[in-house]
Image (spheres, rainbow, N blue to C red):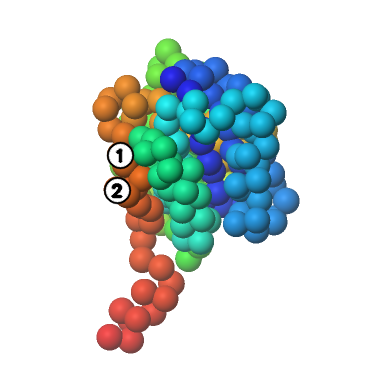
């Protein structure tokens, strides 16, 4: 199964082409450039350099959230644009699960975290065994204190992955809880992780159409929160 995957949920941007669990090509940027200007050219260059065409892709995958509201919207819109002409099935992947796949080989409990601001993180925890992932929690936005309480109840060391890993490490270590950071080259969101999560969705029969694919923000935007507060 050939998958083209996009990741633009945070400051990094990447695109990847995979076949089953094998990575054929990936482009990654942590330059701070606007994703709307970089994501589609990255995808087009990958296909060109691998000698593959969009028509040969079986699935279009994207990190559908949580993450930056703008970044997630850009990624989902780009994926829809790739999928629509050929009516390709789509995989709207959890950003957090996609990150967890990047260190599933390490085993143990994995805590995928993204900085959600306002002293909160987007977070999901997983158990990695034999190269497979099992969910311990759903994706959600929680406070760092709440995360520390949850980890304390688990009693297990946590492998931290994601752009909020350093933030979570500080909170957990201050609470006296064991944790370890993934190395920098595995820590940030990548399109390979999205493709790997997409493969699981495909195997479970959970692909959707381009029309049905939508972002999963897991929290109201700042404008919506301010409007609620005024009301």
Spatial CA span between label 1 and label 2: 6 Å
Do callouts 1 and 2 mark residues in contact (Cβ within 8 Å)? yes
Element under label 2? loop
Residue at the disc numbered 1: 208
Location of residue 182 with respect to 32 vertically, above or below: above
Q: Secondary structure at mark 1?
A: loop
Check the image and report above or below for 171 versus 127: below
The residue drawn where x is 36% and y is 35% is 89
Please state, as top left, top right, bottom left or bottom right, where the N terminus lies in the image.
top left
Outermost top residue: 130
Q: Residue at x 48, y 66 (%)?
A: 118
Question: How many badges with numbers are in the image?
Answer: 2
In this view, which residue lies farthest toward the bottom?
A: 230
Tell me if residue 35 can be seen.
yes
Task: Residue 101 in the image: state x and y as whole percent.
Answer: 48, 28
| 32, 166: nearer the viewer | 32
Q: Report which residue position mark 2 lands on.
A: 212
Quarter of the figure with residue 217: bottom left
Residue 226 coordinates in the image, percent (x, y): 39, 79
Q: Residues within 10 Å of mark 1 (few under 14, many from 20)?
A: some
């Amino acid at each position: 199964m050939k998958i083209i995957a996009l990741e633009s949920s945070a400051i990094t941007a990447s695109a990847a082409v995979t076949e089953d669990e094998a990575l054929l090509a990936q482009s990654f940027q942590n330059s701070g450039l606007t994703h709307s200007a970089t994501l589609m050219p990255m995808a087009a260059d990958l296909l060109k350099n691998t000698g593959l065409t969009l028509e040969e892709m079986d699935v279009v995958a994207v990190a559908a959230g949580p993450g930056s509201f703008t970044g997630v919207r850009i990624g989902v819109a780009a994926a829809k644009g790739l999928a629509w002409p050929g009516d390709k099935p789509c995989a709207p992947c959890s950003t957090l699960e996609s990150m967890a796949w990047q260190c599933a080989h390490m085993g143990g409990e994995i805590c995928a975290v993204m900085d959600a601001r306002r002293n909160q993180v987007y977070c999901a925890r997983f158990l990695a065994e034999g190269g497979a992932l099992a969910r311990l929690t759903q994706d959600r936005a929680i406070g760092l204190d709440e995360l520390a309480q949850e980890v304390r109840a688990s009693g297990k060391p946590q492998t931290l992955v994601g752009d909020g890993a350093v933030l979570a490490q500080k909170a957990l270590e201050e609470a006296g809880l064991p944790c370890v950071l993934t190395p920098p080259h595995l820590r940030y969101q990548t399109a390979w992780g999205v493709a790997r999560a997409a493969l699981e969705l495909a195997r479970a029969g959970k692909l959707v159409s381009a029309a049905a694919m939508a972002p999963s923000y897991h929290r109201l935007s700042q404008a919506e929160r301010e409007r609620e507060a005024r009301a």
